Image: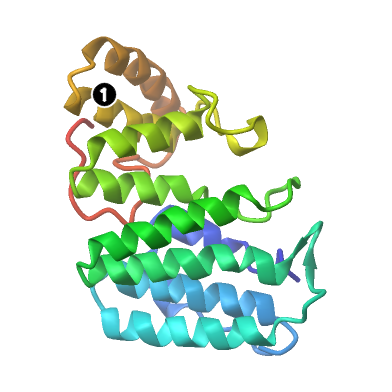
Amino acid sequence: EAYYGMKVHVYIRFGKWQEIIDAPMPDDPELFVVTTALWHYAKGVAYAATGDVENAARQQKHFLDAWERVPERRLIFNNESRDMLKVPDAMLAGELAYRRENYDEAFAHLRRCVELYDNLNYTEPWAWMQPPRHALGALLLEQGHVDEAAQVYRADLGLDDTLVRPSQHPGNIWSMHGYAECCRRLGKQAEAAAIEQRLAAAQAAADVAVSSSCFCRQADACCD
C-alpha cells in the first residue's frame, strides 16, 4: 500500500499544483492510510506553493491525523511507513514556515527533513522519491544563501565525500541546475561551464524544461 500513492511524488516533482489540489482522496482512508497521508501532504505543499497558507495548514492537520492512524508495522519494504512519513512531515512544516516568511524556522525544518531522509534504511526503489536537498537548495538560493545551497547540491551530486554513496544522486538534472547557478553566482565560471555542459546534455534528453531544482521555488533562476 505504501507504493500506491507514488504518483504524488511525480506531481510534486513537476509542480502540478492544481492537479494535486483537484485530485480526489482515496475512497477508503483507513485501508489506504499511507496514501491518504501522502495526498494530504501533497495538497499541503500545493496550497503552500500557490500562496494559500490557510488551506495548507488545514492539510497539514489532516496529514498529522492520518499519520497517527498508520499501523506501527505498516512497511514500505524495510522501512516502517511511519518513519518514512516523518520526511514529508518535516518538508510540509518547512514549506508552511517558508510561505509565512519565517525563514529560519523553515530552513530548520528542511534541514531536519534532509537528516530524516538520509537515515531511512536503504531500499530499491527508494522509500522517499524526491531528495529533500532539491527543495532545500532551491529555497536557499531564493533567499540568497548561495554558499550553503552550493554545499547542498555538491553533496547530492556526490562531488564531495559528505554523503555515503546510496545517498548521492550523481548527474541528476535537478542538482546540476542548482549547482550551476551557485557556481555562476559565486564567480566560479570554469566550474559552472563544466557543469552547464553536462546540464545541457541532460536537458536535451528531457521533455520538461528544468528551471530550478524544485518547482516550489517562486523566483526565476538566474542562469537558465
**Residue drawn at x 75%, y 45% as measured from the top left:** 124
Q: Looking at the picture, does residue 195 appear above or below residue 142? A: above
Q: Looking at the picture, does residue 62 appear above or below residue 76? A: below
Tally of numbered discs: 1
Residue 130 showing in the rendered view: yes
Side of 14 where 84 appears, left or right: right
Q: Amino acid at mark 1?
A: Cys
Tell me where residue 169 appears, x and y as whole percent: 56, 33
**Residue drawn at x 26%, y 30% as measured from the top left:** 182
Q: Indicate the quadrant containing the C terminus: top left, top right, bottom left or bottom right.
A: top left
Residue 26 showing in the rendered view: no
Tell me where residue 66 appears, x and y as whole percent: 60, 85
Question: In which image quadrant can residue 79 be found?
Answer: bottom right
Nearer to us in this view, 220 or 128: 128
Q: Residues within 10 Å of mark 1 (few under 14, many from 20)?
A: many
Q: Looking at the picture, does residue 213 appear above or below residue 224? A: below
Question: In which image quadrant can residue 65 be found?
Answer: bottom right
- The residue to which callout 1 is attached is 183
Tell me where residue 17 appears, x and y as whole percent: 37, 67
Q: Indicate the quadrant containing the N terminus: top left, top right, bottom left or bottom right.
A: bottom right
Tell me where residue 175 appears, x and y as whole percent: 41, 35
**Residue drawn at x 63%, y 68% as measured from the top left:** 5
Question: In which image quadrant can residue 128 be found?
Answer: bottom right
